[in-house]
Image: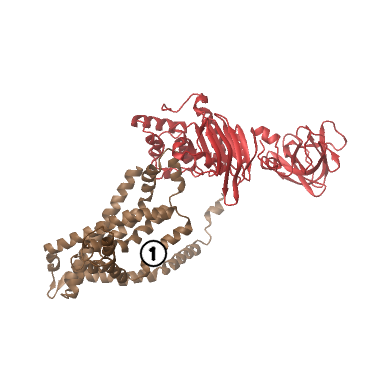
């Protein structure tokens, strides 16, 4: 048991626990909230559960915290099975979406509450509350009432309260969703720094893919109660395994392709692929706007690139860049992003263009989600 | 900003007049209610106050002097004891029920609240007489108690303090449950979850988080039940069997037996002053509790 002050060194390894989730099922009537979910979360890792609403991400977090009882399955913190353990005996920190700060207590009262429950000595409580307030840059605000704080300050108090008793696992349920954009981006970095400093295992729930990409060591993408893919942010972005993941993470446009003998064909034109494709069901080619480049019209075939032709429909100014929407064979639309640096000649609406994309950037994914959680 | 813009004030009087007429229209909606309150509450009360200082010879303090007699002190004590007891029992019975109703699904809670409100649909007199039937010497309750061998002789459950308290609790309970339910319903379930997550057992979370957060509802319920109990007449008169003398019964006796409007008015004024004093004390008390709990 830890009873010392909040760690200020970077040593977190000993203070974290790995989480092993296996075969968790939870139905609400006929709705499958969690469909045989298994996931290993490493000790000290910042893992994000990402998905649209109804994907099961919050339900999974509630199973970890003990507020939702699964129909079957196992949750282990290190070697210890906790699925039958009531919430107050799990000893894990949690930040709630609406913070859930006790309105009848001061800021200091909120922070002291978990320590009082653990029978920490009074003098030590005071010292640790002060230290925790400093940790979240709220020094001197201990005597304030909760309703006297701004949204960002409440967020920080909630964070401090969740870590003051030094839990080895921290759960966060969309903690930044109530903040405005600027503050949210600032808090993303702060939360990540806090995690790095205290070193506990963190499970973070969000529906905001940008937030997930910014903060996480790994991201588990959920859809319809199943885990679609678990990977570090970059791998998830560059090598999505399902159409859902490709569509949900980052901006992308999809074109249907036909697959045979491990190769793929887009509108009668064979694609250069980074690796062979197994199976023969319908597939999509996923194009990210920033990976596309404008090719000069004169050159025809090009080595090492796939080429797609189209007609410019519209260009939209984004400040640092311009999005050019291009119609492909009238029925489809893709877009490319052109950064505004130096003298860029922008194609005009109606103009015919040739767009190129590298072989490594050629993402081909199955159209339908595969059965069973892809790992 | 150019000097031309800052100098010109367009439509200023017309806009101000519009704002004024809008307020006037809103005010006129509450006018009937204000009139009613003025006519049937304030004026009669002022008249009552006036009467309490009058007798055949003009101004007098005799009505108030008479109240110093020990029998009135005894009545006052009975009134307060009964009000305290009824309020306490209502809290003990009402809190768990409101708690359960607040945890239920909205559908189930509606049914429970309907049952709570059900007594309101029958007349006060009917309910009181029903208790008389149930509680009397050879009533249903005593029959059962003796059949099951719990008592040897019939208990004296009516025509006394006990019977009055039972009947009043039954009538007052909804006034306790409804504000409690409303307060508990507004407590975010995440507070209790947060408490559990921070390590509080269900019992600790209840006492340290739920009860303090439900205090506003408890305060409202206690205030309503206590004040209504202070002025209660029908139930003590019937179930007390003449042995439980409440303040309101003294008023009735002054009028019905002695036709003494001055004395009755003085009694009424004293009850009003005591009630207002209690309300003031109570609001001070809950304010102090909130300040102590929240430190603000």
Residue B139 in the image: above or below residue A287: below
Q: Secondary structure at mark 1?
A: helix
Q: Position of residue B262 (x, y in %)?
A: 17, 71
Q: Colour of chain B?
A: brown
Asked if residue A367 lies left or right of residue A16, the reply is right
Residue that numbered label 1 is attached to: B117
A330 and B123: which is toward the camera: B123
Residue A190 seen: no
Tally the marks: 1
Query: Residue A276: x and y, percent?
Result: 79, 33
Q: Position of residue A327 (x, y in %)?
A: 79, 47
Q: How is the image coloured?
A: by chain
Q: Quadrant of residue A106?
A: top left
Question: How many other residues sit within 10 Å of disc 1, few (<14), some (14-19) or many (≥20)?
Answer: some
**Picture coordinates of residue B151, whole percent (x, y):** 23, 59
Query: What residue lies at 44% left-to-right and 35% top-to-bottom?
Result: A138
Q: Nearer the viewer, residue B206 or B290?
A: B206
Quadrant position of the C terminus of chain B in the picture: top left
Q: Residue at x 50, y 42 (%)?
A: A96
Find chain A in the image and tell me its colour.
Answer: red
Mark 1 — on which chain does it sit? B
């Amino acid at each position: 048991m830890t009873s010392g002050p909040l760690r200020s060194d970077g040593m977190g390894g000993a203070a974290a626990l790995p989480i092993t989730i296996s075969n968790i099922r939870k139905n609400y009537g006929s709705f499958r909230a969690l469909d045989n979910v298994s996931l290993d979360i490493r000790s000290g890792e910042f893992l994000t559960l990402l998905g649209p609403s109804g994907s099961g991400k919050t339900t999974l977090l509630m199973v970890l915290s003990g507020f939702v009882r699964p129909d079957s399955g196992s949750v282990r913190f290190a070697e210890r099975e906790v699925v039958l353990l009531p919430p107050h005996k799990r000893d894990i920190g949690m930040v709630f979406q609406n913070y859930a700060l006790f309105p009848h207590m001061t800021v200091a009262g909120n922070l002291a509450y978990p320590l009082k429950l653990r029978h920490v000595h009074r003098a030590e409580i005071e010292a640790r509350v002060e230290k925790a307030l400093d940790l979240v840059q709220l020094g001197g605000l201990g005597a304030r009432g909760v309703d006297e704080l701004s949204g960002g300050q409440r967020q920080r108090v909630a964070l401090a309260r969740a870590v003051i008793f030094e839990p080895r696992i921290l759960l966060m349920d969309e903690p930044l969703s109530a903040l405005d954009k600027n503050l949210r981006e600032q808090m993303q970095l702060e939360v990540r720094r806090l995690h790095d400093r205290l070193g506990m295992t963190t499970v973070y729930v969000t529906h905001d893919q940008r937030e997930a990409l910014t903060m996480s060591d790994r991201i588990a993408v959920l859809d319809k109660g199943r885990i679609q893919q678990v990977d570090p942010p970059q791998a998830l972005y560059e090598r999505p395994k399902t159409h859902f993941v490709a569509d949900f993470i980052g901006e992308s446009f999809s074109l249907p392709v036909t697959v045979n003998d491990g190769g793929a064909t887009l509108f009668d034109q064979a694609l250069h692929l980074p690796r062979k494709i197994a199976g023969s069901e319908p597939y999509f080619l996923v194009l990210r706007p920033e990976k596309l480049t404008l090719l000069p019209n004169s050159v025809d075939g090009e080595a090492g690139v796939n080429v797609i032709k189209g007609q410019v429909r519209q260009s939209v100014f984004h400040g640092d860049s311009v999005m050019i929407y291009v119609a492909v064979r009238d029925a489809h639309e893709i877009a490319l992003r052109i950064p505004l640096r130096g003298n860029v000649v922008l194609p005009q609406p109606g103009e015919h263009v040739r767009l190129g994309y590298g072989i490594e950037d050629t993402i081909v994914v199955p159209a339908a989600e595969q059965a069973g959680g892809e790992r | 900003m150019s000097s031309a813009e800052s100098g010109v004030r367009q439509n200023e009087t017309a806009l101000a007049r519009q704002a004024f007429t809008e307020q006037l229209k809103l005010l006129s909606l509450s006018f009937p209610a204000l009139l009613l309150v003025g006519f049937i509450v304030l004026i009669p009360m002022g008249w009552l106050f006036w009467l309490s200082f009058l007798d055949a010879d003009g101004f007098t303090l005799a009505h108030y002097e008479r109240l110093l007699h020990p029998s009135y002190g005894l009545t006052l004590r009975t009134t307060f004891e009964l009000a305290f007891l009824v309020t306490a029992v209502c809290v003990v019975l009402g809190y768990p029920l409101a708690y359960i109703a607040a945890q239920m699904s909205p559908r189930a809670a509606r049914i429970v609240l309907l049952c709570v409100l059900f007594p309101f649909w029958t007349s006060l007199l009917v309910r009181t007489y029903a208790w008389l039937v149930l509680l009397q010497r050879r009533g249903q309750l005593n029959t059962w108690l003796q059949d099951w061998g719990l008592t040897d002789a019939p208990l004296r459950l009516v025509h006394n303090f006990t019977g009055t308290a039972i009947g009043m609790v039954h009538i007052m309970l909804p006034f306790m449950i409804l504000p409690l339910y409303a307060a508990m319903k507004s407590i975010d379930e995440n507070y209790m979850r947060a408490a559990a997550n921070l390590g509080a057992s269900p019992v600790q979370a209840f006492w340290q988080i739920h009860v303090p957060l439900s205090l506003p509802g408890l305060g409202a319920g206690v205030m309503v039940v206590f004040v209504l109990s202070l002025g209660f007449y029908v139930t003590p008169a019937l179930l007390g069997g003449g042995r439980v003398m409440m303040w309101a019964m003294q008023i009735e006796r002054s009028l019905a037996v002695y036709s003494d409007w001055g004395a009755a008015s003085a009694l009424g004024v004293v009850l009003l002053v005591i009630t207002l004093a209690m309300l003031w004390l109570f609001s001070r008390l809950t304010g102090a509790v909130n300040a102590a709990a929240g430190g603000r």
